[in-house]
Image (cartoon, rainbow, N blue to C red):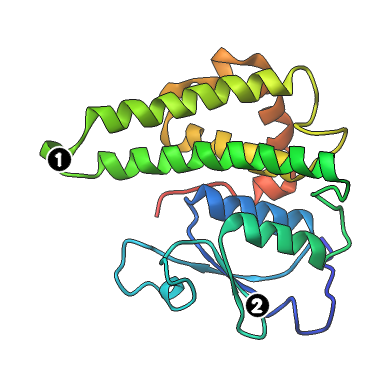
Amino acid sequence: MLYWRPTCAMVHEMKLYGSHSSPFARKVRVVLSEKRLDYEFVPTDVAQADHPAQAYNPLGKIPVLLLPDGTPVYDSAVIVEYLDTVSPVGRLIPEEARPRMLVKRWEALADGVMEAAVLLIMESRRAAELRSSAVDARQRGKVQRALNQIAHDLGERAHCCGDAFTLADAAIGSALFYLDFRFPEFAWREQHANLARLAERLEKRKSFEDTMPRAA
């Protein structure tokens, strides 16, 4: 694959701090692939007190995109919006107000699913006596309602928004595949045939093939 570079050095020097299992980092990596932007991936374990992303994001969260001039960009929604302006290859966010809003709304829904799923993981890793069944039920409820909404809004279309691949597909795909990775019990493919068809199409894209999640 050819990668578009605004200058000889600028894009090559971008660094992305993230983990191979983070759905938010995967969304950014999918966008980087779709935009054909070169970068260095820096595996980052946020469970470590001295992980490198803390030097660039005071919240200590990933992903963080470090630009060649040393400017850090966070969080994932800000990163992908920036990346869409850097390369002229395949715009993923429409310029017109309403289509743009719809794509960003899809992203917000996907991000909400990923946030709830990450909170479920964090809760499961607490000591047994500290875990909250109410927290678990609340987050699972968010995921299930979001899945129902995603399936309803997708309908029989081939893409989440419009007639081509957009950030909406990158975000929704990252969320759905994270559920496959961490929470197969949601069984969203069995519950929603249209989501299963969307997933089959997304899985064939190189951007998703090259960013399969794996445990740290």
Count every numbered label the image shows and give the total. Answer: 2
Q: Amino acid at mark 1?
A: Leu
**How would you rate the neighbour count of disc 2 (Cα within 10 Å): few for under 14, some for 14-19, many for 20 or more?**
some
Residue 19 location in percent, x, y? 48, 58
Based on the displayed image, in which of its 4 quarters is residue 14 positioned? bottom right
The residue beneath circle 2 is 67
Judge left or right: residue 131 versus residue 169: left
In the structure shown, which secondary structural element does the residue marked by tag 2 occupy? loop
In the structure shown, which secondary structural element does the residue marked by tag 1 occupy? helix
> What distance separates the C-alpha of mark 2 from that of mark 1?
40 Å
**How would you rate the neighbour count of disc 1 (Cα within 10 Å): few for under 14, some for 14-19, many for 20 or more?**
few
Residue extending farthest to the left is 129
Give 40 or 56, whichever is nearer the viewer.
Answer: 56
Give 167 or 29, whichever is nearer the viewer.
Answer: 167
Q: Quadrant of the N terminus?
A: bottom right
Residue in view at x 70 percent, y 44 percent = 104
Residue 180 location in percent, x, y? 50, 32
Judge left or right: residue 128 versus residue 96: left
Query: Residue 130's mark?
Result: 1
Above/below status of 3 relative to 12: above
Q: Amino acid at mark 2?
A: Leu
Callout 2–callout 1 Cβ contact below 8 Å: no
Residue 96 location in percent, x, y? 88, 46
Judge left or right: residue 129 versus residue 43: left
Residue in view at x 47 percent, y 37 percent = 181
Query: Residue 105's mark?
Result: none
Residue extending farthest to the front is 97
Above/below status of 32 relative to 203: below
Q: Earlier in the sequence, mark 2 or mark 1?
A: 2
Residue in view at x 49 percent, y 51 percent = 22
Residue in view at x 15 percent, y 40 percent = 130
Based on the displayed image, in which of its 4 quarters is residue 136 positioned? top left
